[in-house]
Image: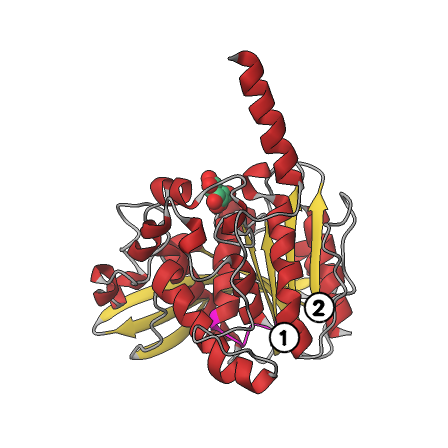
Amino acid sequence: LKSCLILLFVITKSYAQTIETTSPLPDALKTIDGITIDKVSDWEKKRRPEILTLFEDNIYGQMPKKFDKISYKTTNEVANAMNGKANLKEVDIKVEKDKKTVTIHLILFIPVKATKNSPVFLLINNRGKENTDPTRKVKSEFWPAEMAIDSGYAIAAFHISDAAPDNKDTYQNSVLQLYPEQLNADNGMKAIGAWAWAASRVMDYFKTNKDIDFNKVSLVGHSRGGKAALWAGAQDKRFAMIFASCSGNTGAALARRKVGESIKAINTTFPHWFNNNYKRFNDNADALPVDQHLLISLIAPRPVYTTSATEDIWADPVGSYMSISEAQKVYSLYGKKSGLSPNPPAVNTPIIQSILGYHNREGIHNMTAYDWGNFIRFAGFHYK
Ligand code: GTR
């Protein structure tokens, strides 16, 4: 038994390193009716909306866009915070619908030295609130605000619990209060959808803030936050760039690879993340009408950067690279060549000068200063 188990481990491990899927991937450039797409206008009019609906119906749920009112209240302002380098602003973004209210609390640092409005990184914070400490007593690599400010970027964050508590029993207690009909629909929004929805409300706010360059908002998320960031980027074209760190299953990783976390595992541990229909694919990833390369394709022609970590096989590093290399097809339609090779780059070798960027960092499932350093370089390359 022991040698059988060792053999199984070796086979699984070597499969995890190959660039293979267990069945062919759905073609980005062929419609459900079998029509081949070969120009941007057909992609945007026919295939893109078709794929977006497939993701809504089968995975992330609908994205309700209507509400009665949105308002912004500054709750704290500190000039020359961060040793004089940045101005801090904390804002409550209040959204009302049918007499129900949701408040997303935003923390925002803007570089003091900026001579014009600043590009900004917005983090969907799925970890402890101390990671985005506005007082800067705690400085976390998860949101290295000083690093962004020193590089000439504003940096912002909101916490996922404001939009949907990350809990199967209480996730309904925020954004979904505005949209109760979603709770009974098999393609209804759940927690990940609500987090993405909240990111879009921050965009609504940025539009009103003259210190922010509204055309240069980069959305960042790690792991479950990375899944939400990619979904937000697919839904809301106002995000200029998307960064997904170790986003794994139902993030950047291909479901048809069957490496690491499975659809069944994610739906069992986190039944409140994705819609009810997704559970139908628990034992049958091959039957999904989409795979995650199509999620990246929905963000085209905007830049996307994904990361992996060598010890994070649960999030399938190779499959997370394959989805961006597969998405090149759609980027090429827009004339955006990235020249990614089918094989992932060596460890700690970031691909920066490309519309689709990637690195596989040595280490564990996390988001670190190394990752952010490459995000800043990638954004700099595209904004130059
Ligand atoms: C894991 C989960 C992953 C990923 C991760 C995280 O437990 O299986 O899909 O989301 O949590 O968010 O750190």
Q: Which residues are magenta?
A: 235-240
Outermost residue toward the top?
2
| SS at circle 1 | loop
Q: Which mark is residue 355?
A: 2
Alpha carbon distance from label 1 to label 2: 8 Å
Residue 285 at x, y percent in the picture: 43, 50
Question: The residue under label 1 is which amino acid type?
Answer: Pro
Q: Nearer the viewer, residue 160 or 232?
A: 232
Q: Which mark is residue 177?
A: none
Q: Earlier in the sequence, mark 1 or mark 2?
A: 1
Tags 1 and 2 touching, CB below 8 Å = yes
Question: The residue under label 2 is which amino acid type?
Answer: Ile
Point 37% across, 40% down: residue: 269
Q: Nearer the viewer, residue 110 or 310?
A: 310
Q: Does residue 305 show up magenta in the picture?
A: no
- Is 1 on the left or on the right of 71, as rendered? right
Q: Quadrant of the C terminus?
A: bottom right
In the figure, 362 relative to 222: above or below?
above
Q: Nearer the viewer, residue 138 or 218?
A: 218
Point 52% across, 60% down: residue: 229
Residue neighbourhood size for the residue with mark 1, other residues' Cα within 10 Å, grouped as few (<14), some (14–19), many (≥20): many
Observer able to see residue 81: no
Asked where in the image residue 100 lies, by quadrant, the reply is bottom left
- Is 344 on the left or on the right of 55, as rendered? right
Say which residue label 1 marks: 301
